[in-house]
Amino acid sequence: MRLNIESVLDVGSSIGLNLHFIDAIFEGRLKLYAVDPNRKAFDRLLSLRRIKITKAWNCDVFRLPLPDLSIDLVFTSGVLIHIAPEDLGRATDEIVRVARR
């Protein structure tokens, strides 16, 4: 099965470990995007240079700076536990908004 993935966004990327492994699996062929609201983690993501990040933003899940349907694969891992229950719908709506599929 061919996935036809060209771009990936990690929402809550921290220092980019998930993107590092995705990059290795796809042998550097993807455009990688990252979002993290924690300034310290975001700065480390940019300074470690483990992988080539196409674009990264220091922001939260509620205002992803991307057009609708612009990323092939959008995911988050463990970040939603930090979102208040009453805001989960808004957070997931924003993730789905930028996801192409």
Image (spheres, rainbow, N blue to C red):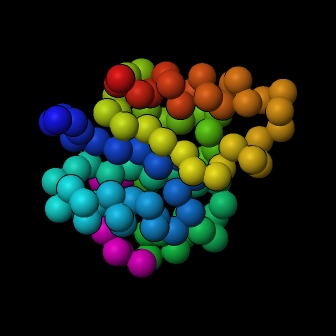
Magenta stretch: dominant SS? loop
Q: Position of residue 20 (x, y in %)?
A: 36, 66
Which residue is at a point 50% across and 25% down the rendered structure image?
A: 96
65 lies above or below 69:
below
- Please give left or right for residue 26 compared with residue 95 in the image: left
- Is residue 26 shown left or right of residue 72? left
* The magenta segment: 48-55
Q: Where is residue 88 in the image (x, y as percent from the top left)?
A: 73, 30
Of 39 and 69, nearer the camera is: 69
Whether residue 58 appears in this view of the structure is no
Q: What residue is shown at x 77% (from left), y 41% (from top)?
A: 83
The structure residue drawn at horizontal position 84% and vertical position 27%, both measured from the top left corner, is: 86
Q: Which residue lies furthest to the bottom in this view?
A: 48
Q: Quadrant of residue 100?
A: top left
| Residue furthest to the front | 1
- Residue, x 41% and y 44% (percent of image)? 9
How many numbered dots are placed on residues in this image? 0
* In this picture, residue 98 sits left or right of residue 37: left
x, y percent for residue 43: 54, 70
Residue 59 lies, with reference to residue 21, above or below; the image says: above
**Residue 90 visible somewhere in the drawing:** yes
* Depth check, front residue: 77 or 49: 77
Q: In which quarter of the image is the N terminus?
A: top left
Check if residue 69 falls in the magenta segment: no
Q: Locate the C terminus and report the quarter of the image it occupies.
A: top left
Nearer-the-camera pick, 10 or 81? 81
22 left or right, relative to 42: left
